[in-house]
Image (spheres, grey):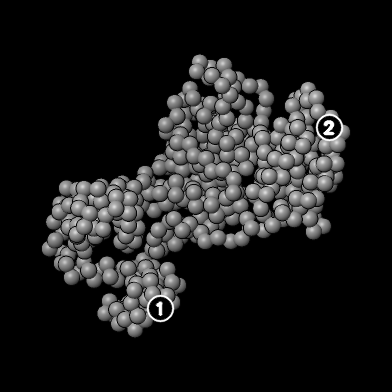
Amino acid sequence: ELVVLRDVCGRVRQQLHAAAVAIVAGGPRRCDPIAGDGGRVDGAVAERAMAAGITIAPHQHDGRVEAAAPIHYGGAIVGALSARWPIGSTYDLSRASTVMTMTAAAAAPILSAALAHRQRPKPAAPELIGTTTAMVELKRGVERAASAPFAVLIEGESGSGKELVAQAIHRASLRRDRPLRTLNCAALPDDLVEAELFGHVRGSFTGAVGDRTGVFEEAHGGTLFLDEIGELSPRAQAKLLRVIQEGEIRRVGENLSRRVDVRIVAATNRDLRREVEAGRFRVDLLYRLDVIRIAVPPLRERAEDVPLLVDHFWREATSRVASRATLAATTLAALARYHWPGNVRELQNVLASLAVRCGRRGVVGPSALPPHLAQGSAAAADKWRLDEARRTFDERFVRAALVRSGGHRGRAAEELGVTRQGLTKLMARLGISSSSPARDTG
């Protein structure tokens, strides 16, 4: 449906010689961009058309000519078709209202179908791997955040997966078909913050050889992920606060204000409340960002998820280098015992390095691990015999399969490659009761 709606916008733009045409969904007080062709159209004219319930003919407003027609379906207003022309356009706009009204009527059932498709529930956060209680709670938090329109603050250590959480929130939200843009605030020099956030016009500063949109405009209608938000300077914090409060941006070197509809998802590895107490972070900005808070647990607090993560990252790494090597049980045990100060990112990098350094076939033993991991394995060798390591990982993988199947033994057995009777015997040998799926911490 979205492809068809974009094509409709393109045809209307061509027919009316407009600078931009867009279709939005929503009601009189809110609008969500669905499709468009050309530049961005200010949502205010669409909101007025939906509020009035009638077509607004082309008229001059804030240095541009604009028009909009409400889209009616099933006795209700579900959106609007809007268009923009530059001042001084020589095209005869007398028939624009008729064309837009007829197009709005034709697009109504397509828009309704697109909205129905967007509202279908989807599984939450399949990219967040783990079955421990901490991960179950994290996925529930992602579901709650995705279903609400408010700002989200993600807290967690470096490498714990904050960006994956932000992506999961966006993909499960009603904005999933709109852009997701990411900006690492720690990498922003203070003199370039405004240009990166809000864009600039040609000649506004040395090196500005052309107009450029900022991440706020690029994310219009979608989500803006601001990573390491605690690294912003006080000046940049003030600029960001103003945009969040007013919903408008102004490109560097330009006097024209532009409306933006962006959902902010911010992430930090700092305690922003302590940063506020220390005078390094604005309390009013914290209030704006900390509407929905999600804490990402470090890997050491969900060690039972390490086997699942190892399996996932090892398959991913070996497939990229065409390797058929496997990890020994003692290697898996060493990986599970390590405390992972670099969290999931460190685990992923260790496995990628192993896949490259080791042979394309055979079994990778613990001696192939980096020294700090191998030493930890040797120190604990008297506590972990090979049979204990195998039993521990068998139990964790069986429990994980039962959790993923919702306790359905037939599906779990199929996933594990054994018969239902074989799974029952395996569960008895490992001491796993029939109520084990609820005990997802392993």
Q: At which x and y percent is residue 133?
A: 41, 63
Location of residue 9 by image quarter: top right
Instruction: Specify the farthest residue to the right.
Output: 94
Among numbered discs 1 and 2, the one appearing first in the sequence: 2
- Nearest the viewer among 152 and 164 is 164
Rendered image: mark on residue 429: none
Residue sitting nearer the eye, 170 or 364: 364
**Mark 1 neighbour density, 10 Å: few (under 14) some (14–19) many (20 or more):** some
Q: Which residue is mark 1?
A: 409
- Tell me the amino acid under the disc marked 2: Leu
Residue 42 seen from this side: no
What percent of the width, then of the height, locates residue 2?
65, 50
* Quarter of the C terminus within the rendering: bottom left
User: Residue at position x 22%, y 69% from top?
Assistant: 390
| Location of residue 442 with respect to 337 vertically, above or below | below
Q: Is residue 296 left or right of residue 251?
A: left
Residue hosting label 2: 93
Q: As shown in the figure, which amino acid type bears the numbered disc 1?
A: Arg
**Which secondary structure lies at badge 1?**
helix
